[in-house]
Image (spheres, helix red, strand yellow):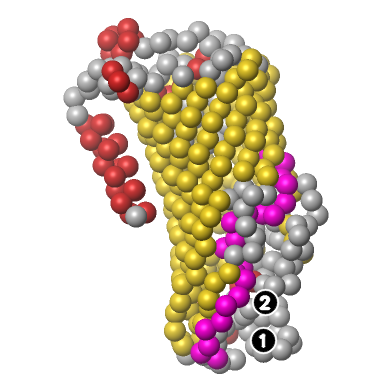
Amino acid sequence: MTKTILLTGVACLSIVSVVKPSPVFAHGENAQEECDCDKNLHVSSGASSHAPIGVMGDHMHGKGEWMLSYRYKHMAMEGNRDGRDDLSPEEIVTSVANRFSGVAGQPGTLRVVPTKMDMDMHMFGAMYAPTDWLTLMGMAMWMEKDMDLVTFQGGMGTTRLGSFKTQSEGWGDTSLSGLVKLYEDDVNHVHLNLGVSIPTGSIKEEGTVLTPMNMNMRMRLPYGMQLGTGTYDLHPGVTYSGVHHDWSWGAQYSAEIRLEDENDQGYAWGDKHAVTAWGAYEWAPWISTSLRLEGETQGDIDGIDANIVAPVQTADPDNYGGQRVEAAFGVNLLSTGGVLKGNRLAFEAAAPIYEDLNGPQMKRDYTFTLGWQKAF
């Protein structure tokens, strides 16, 4: 299903970008006539009026306006890294100590290694502006996670016993935010992002694993396979955007700050900080393209879930977090006329150009985001 959605999205965007523009995706003088040109810069009528679809909380609305949105995000991870060094599964099981060594039945080194992980996120959002200086935003998310792992036989050695897959799916955490305007002129706009996430995602997901002793055992899945953080989290940030003729640009700082020392299972995810900057060019009022860079840093997990004990790197709270820089390319499409007027379709593809991970942990391969927005 994931491949179908991705291929469908890419195909739609490719067709729209090469066919002769119609009144739905118009260009030139006709588009300007059909477009509702808002005097407020942050509700610009062109395709570049929003940031790339991978940026959340990037724009505000005028008083009384609503916007509904849907984003599909696919994240793929493959291979393992400790710091900036890649590690093979054989290197991990012969050189990395098992945190739980000494616990009954636990070997001295890791014996199970993840090799691939896919995560699909379906994000449903709504925005409403009660005033020109405040826009309210809410988002709910359905998540699906799949991880492939390989088990090595016995307590030592590099003999592969077999492979298995773990899965989890369900609603993630829910976020509520307010965007507060700080400054705006003919070119520039600045607003605060103030949000909180509510721990509606499960942190007790279970799966069946293949043990080094060739047994299938039901156990609580490691932290990365859970659906939420289990804590109330603060989401502060600030966003700047600018536009001049066909060019637009912007930058955003965002963070995830845990408001609790631990959840009801005894741990809390590390705080996360991210900075991103982008530039976009509007080729016509109905299409723009963008380039974006994002850097993030996150601490490891503080505390431990006593129910997560296994000779696998993902069971160790220290093997989470790190630093990462990604580069992304995006396309925004805006319908300026006809029955689809005001609908926005966008996609963005991103890949890491630098990773320094608190490993061993899985490397990020790529991220793909496809989104739809409609303001009214």
Residue at (47%, 64%) from the top-left corner? 146
Q: Residues within 10 Å of mark 1 (few under 14, many from 20)?
A: some
Q: CA distance from mark 1 to mark 2?
A: 9 Å
Q: Which of 130/344 is in front? A: 130
**Lateral position of residue 333 relative to residue 121, left or right:** left
**Lateral position of residue 254 relative to residue 54, left or right:** right
Label 2, on which residue? 309
x and y, in percent, of residue 143 in the image: 51, 53
Which of the labelled discs sits on residue 29, or is there none?
A: none
Image quadrant containing the N terminus = bottom left
Residue at (46%, 88%) from the top-left corner? 161
Amino acid type, label 2: Val
Q: Residue at the far right: name it.
A: 261
User: Which residues fall within the magenta stretch?
Assistant: 213-235
Residue 79 visible in the shown view:
no
CB atoms at circles 1 and 2 under 8 Å apart?
A: yes
Kind of element beneath mark 1: loop
In this view, 285 is above or below 89: above
x and y, in percent, of residue 340 in the image: 32, 23
Residue 310 visible in the shown view:
yes
Kind of element beneath mark 2: loop
In this view, 132 is above or below 212: above
Residue at (50%, 70%) from the top-left corner? 166
State yes or no: residue 335 in magenta.
no
Q: Residues within 10 Å of mark 2 (few under 14, many from 20)?
A: some
Amino acid type, label 1: Gln
Kindly indicate the quadrant of the structure image that contains residue 267. bottom right
Q: Which of 287/90 is in front? A: 287
**Lateral position of residue 161 relative to residue 297, left or right:** left
Label 1, on which residue? 106
State yes or no: residue 232 in magenta.
yes
